[in-house]
Amino acid sequence: MKAKKGKAIVVDAPEFLSEAEEAEWWDRHQDLIADLLLKHGRRGAVPTKNVSVRLPVTDIERARKLAEKRGVGYQTLIKTLLHEALKKESKIA
């Protein structure tokens, strides 16, 4: 269902023990939040660009299964995993 202008988008976030823990969770889920904002017609959160990437069918199937367990789309899961890997590699380099 599309959110009406000014209506809240509910995100199933866990209970947080601290503000730092909450900030870390939101940081790790930027792509999910951006996807939800775009899905509900709220643009401008995070700029995106379409790209084409050839992936092995087995990786896509694995991503679909993992995404289903997490309750997200497989493309969102792939974007999130890529984002996390890039962030991790940036800290190493």
Image (tube, grey):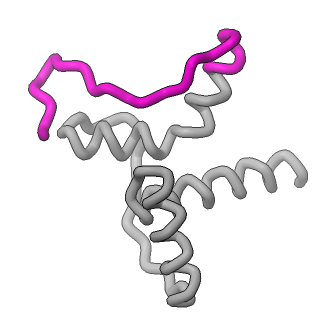
**Magenta-colored segment: predominant secondary structure:** loop
The picture places residue 10, in percent across and down from the top left corner, at 32, 26
**Residue at left 56%, top 87%?**
58
The relative height of residue 77 versus residue 56 in the rendered view (above or below) is above
**Location of residue 42 in the rendering, given as x and y in whole percent from the top left corner:** 23, 34
Residue 7, located in which quarter of the rendered image? top left
Residue 39: x %, y % from top left = 24, 45
View extreme (top): residue = 18
Q: Is residue 6 left or right of residue 81?
A: left
Q: In front: 71, or 5?
A: 71
| Magenta-drawn segment | 1-22
Q: Residue at x 27, y 43 (%)?
A: 38
Q: In the rendered view of the protein, which quadrant contains the N terminus?
A: top left
Foreground: 61 or 89?
61
Report the front residue among 39 and 18.
Answer: 18
Is 21 in the magenta? yes
